[in-house]
Amino acid sequence: MQDKDTGNRLGFTFWISIVWIVLVVFSALTASWWTIPEPDKMDWDNLSVRPGTVTDNAIFQNKTGKETSPYTYWLGTDTMGRDQVSRIVYGSRISLSVGLLAPMIGLLIGGLLGCLAGFYRGPLESTIVAAMDIILAFPGLVLLLAVTFYLGASLKNLIFSLGFLTIPVFCRVARAKTLALSGLEFVQAARLTGAGNMAIMLREIIPNVIVSVAIYGLLVVAFMIMAEGALSFLGLGIPSPTPSWGGMIAEGKEVLDESPHVSMIPAAIMFMTVISFNLIGDSLRSYFERGKHQI
Amino acid sequence: MQILVQKTVRCALVILAVSALTFLMINLLPGDTAYIVGGEEATPADIEAIRKSLGLDQNIVVRYLTWLKNAASGDLGESYLTHEPVLSTIIARLPVTLELLIISQCMALILALPFGIVGAYRSNSMVDRLVNGIGFATLSIPSFVMALLTIYLFSIKLRWLPATGYVSLSANIGANLKSFVLPGLSIAMIEWVVLMRVLRSDMITTLGQDYILMAKAKGLPPWRVLLQHALRPSSFTLITVLGIQIGRHLGEAVIVETIFALPGIGRLLIDSIYARDYHMVQGCVLLITIGYVIINSVVDLLYTALDPRIRTEGGHAG
């Protein structure tokens, strides 16, 4: 991927990805204003219909009560006759809030621990590294399954347990970066001017570490969306009727033969979102790395 | 030798910590285990009796030590549903998971080798870029989607293989292998990318060495240079990564076993979660994690033994 875009520019794929993510975020935010049936409205006359099917009496919930009107199921309906557009748009709220909030927790706690470990070294570093090794000793998905099983799967629990799992990876990146920075001239210069440890951490180390950690975070976002999808797919994520992409894909599994679109459309949307985050993270990383070489 | 002791101690400490965490999990359950065991119709006296028999009236540290002592002697409790011992149930499921892991890694290797070698030999060519692009995209496909795609393609469209229908190894070897093709493939289709990348980058380094130039100068055909001279010295990292992946894929196995209805440990874990069979879940988590820790430590040691640059006790290797 890096070889393709020469020059100090972000490639075409980067901007396409940005557009897609903006689109997904925008639709997640504005979902309730769209004229689409509610995500749990079932249309028993149109079960698993193909994308583009037109119906004369789709039911919308209005302030005045029920109202039927012609409607086109642009992405078809699922096995219970629920509009796929509506479910994907509402489902994106779950994917995005888990995908974006969980890494925040990891970034804050893991990043801070990593900076502390890399800056102060000594017993503090050994303790932090050992604690991280224990979390990393668990196979991620198994720990996640266990935690959500014992605590129950609510949006809050999901975000916290996924966030907890990302702490060690952020800690590693932050620590490595801090170790590399601590030996550089500008940190030594700050020390010579009499700045205390606290001041050096806040003013010199953290602002420099945060960029690489945040870019790394984009790749974690992609991974979190897949992990949440896997949990929902297994039926262990946010319980239904709340729509989620993983749950939609699982539902279509039963009709893969005659109506593959029920699974494949949400799968494609999830794929586009995940690859967009990966591409953005990847492009930014090589962009900043290249920038550094020029100094 | 010193490294061996050091790593074994570390591995043991991690396992101890893991066991403590796993034990804590079941004890952090909202509500009391005694109520779950007793069911809805239990009287307060029943609950009290169950609490006593489970030792729930004791201090948590005492309970952990008792549990640890039992676990070390192979007693992980019994299933609430079948009343069978947890450990023997898990061990009975182990061969399926191991077979899946071995088959999927072999498939991944078969996919990774040719693309890695060609990618290194003609780096930055059209083929190389195409393979890299496909690889990048593949890493954005979660394993459950990959599993559905393989089912859709090979089972529904082409009708080559059934999606489910596990046959045990002892019953019929051919049919058994057949039931592992699609599950193995859906892990391998994601796995090969990492292996391919590692092999490609190591091989590019190897191809720059003098002895490769020598081999080419002798007039050897490219395939002999690549396969006989360059492949072996380029596969150190590949072997390590392969090992690490096996550990990592204990998690993927959970999903793939569930989709393809393979009766392995992963499926057992999921089924126990659905049935809220607490001891079984605890046992699965504990054993999967211990397996993961041990595999990772062994790979770590193997790597130290294989790669002369990391080995501390001198000596030149080839």
Image (spheres, coloured by chain):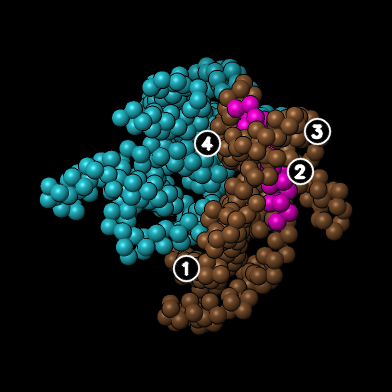
Chain colours: A cyan, B brown
Query: Residue at point 28% right, 48% down?
Result: A182
Both labels 3 and 2 in a single chain: yes
Of tags 4 and 3, the one toward the viewer is: 3
Cα distance between the residues tagged 4 and 3:
27 Å
Question: Which residue, given by chain and number where applicable, does mark 1 sit on?
Answer: B17
| The residue positioned farthest toward the left in the image shown | A194
> Which kind of residue does numbered mark 1 sit on?
Ala
Q: Are marks 2 and 1 in contact (CB under 8 Å)?
A: no
From the image, tell me which residue sits under label 4: A245
Left or right position of B299 against A275: right
> In the rendered image, which quarter is residue B84 located in?
bottom right
Figure check: A181 above or below A46: below
Secondary structure of residue under mark 3: loop
Disc count in the image? 4
Q: Is residue B296 above or below residue A193?
A: below
Q: Residues within 10 Å of mark 4 (few under 14, many from 20)?
A: many
Which amino acid lies under the numbered mark 2 shown in the image of this protein? Val
Mark 3 sits on what residue?
B159
How many angstroms separate mark 2 from mark 1 (CA)? 37 Å
- Find the distance from the CA under tag 3 to the CA under tag 2: 13 Å
Whole-percent x and y of residue A160?
39, 51
